[in-house]
Amino acid sequence: MRINKYLAHKGFSTRKGADELIKSSKVLINKKVAKLGDKIMETDIVEVRGVHNKKDYVYLAYNKKMGIVTTNPGDGEKDILDNVKFKTKVFPVGRLDKDSHGLIILTNDGRITDRLLNPDHYHEKEYNVKVDKAISPAFIKHMAGGLEMENYKTRPAIVNKLGVKSFSIVLTEGKNRQIRKMTEKLGYTVTDLKRVRVQNIPLGDIPLNSFREIVGKEQAEFLKSIGL
């Protein structure tokens, strides 16, 4: 593993910040000053001069209920942080509409926001969706193949029929109210929309308005999948 990637994984900095630490001769590998591009093994000893307190990053999987906005509540509204108190100050990565529910990643790690939300990175988000009438084979085909919207075409998606009026869809982009707009273009109306997975993180059986911490191998796989 390259030294800058290692330092980012360990929470010392971003990869770009790690490069600056290396250029400033603040990083040692086995007591020797590291150089840009150095690779390390598990047995190597890495030290960072002048960085005594690396940030303790927290990653939470939260089950948002309908009626709660993700951020910036208006008059009479409540957001996620109004409903659940966390030991560490965290923020939601991305958003779910007020009338949608399911998985939201909460964290204090600002590094992951662009990596997870930028459509250039093709990160997966899976949803279970119910609509107002029976789903046809043509509906599945068009949802999966990509639709011409007002000013863009949606990417191909993985779509599977779950029931007469329900389906799952895996997106690698996150346009505003994308699934609702796609179904409306095909003459359907969403009656329920639930996010059930982000990358390798499943919603699972987390109760509504509750959360669990993402730790261990699951956390490592998640960070690796977004390039950290």
Image (cartoon, helix red, strand yellow):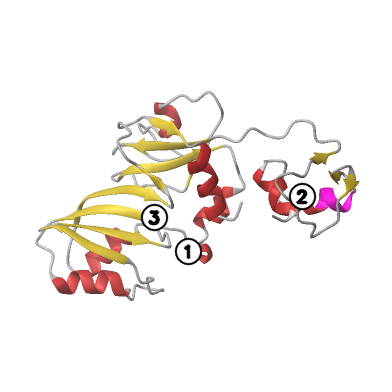
The disc, 2 or 1, on the residue closer to the chain's N-terminal end is: 2
Q: Which residue is mark 2?
A: 18
The image shows residue 25 at horizontal and vertical percentages of 90, 48
Q: Evaluate if marks 2 and 1 touch, with contact meaning CB atoms under 8 Å apart.
A: no
Query: Which dot marks residue 125?
Result: 3
Range of residues picked out in magenta: 20-24
Where disc 1 sits, the SS reads loop
The image shows residue 10 at horizontal and vertical percentages of 67, 41
Instruction: Give the amino acid at mark 1.
Output: Tyr
Q: Is residue 50 left or right of residue 162?
A: right
Nearest the viewer among 9 and 136 is: 9
Q: Could you tell me which residue is drawn at 40 percent across and 31 percent down?
A: 211
Hey, which quadrant is residue 149 in on the image?
A: bottom left
Q: Is residue 168 left or right of residue 222?
A: left
The Cα atoms of the two marked residues, 2 and 1, are separated by 25 Å
Please rate how many residues cluster around mark 2, counting C-alpha atoms within 10 Å: few if below 14, some from 14 to 19, many from 20. Answer: many
Q: Could you tell me which residue is drawn at 39 percent across and 27 percent down?
A: 83
Q: Which residue is mark 1?
A: 122
Q: Is residue 5 left or right of residue 96?
A: right
Q: Is residue 79 left or right of residue 184?
A: right
Nearest the viewer among 228 and 90 is: 228
Instruction: Give the amino acid at mark 2.
Output: Ala
The Cα atoms of the two marked residues, 2 and 3, are separated by 29 Å
The disc, 2 or 3, on the residue closer to the chain's N-terminal end is: 2
Q: Evaluate if marks 2 and 3 touch, with contact meaning CB atoms under 8 Å apart.
A: no
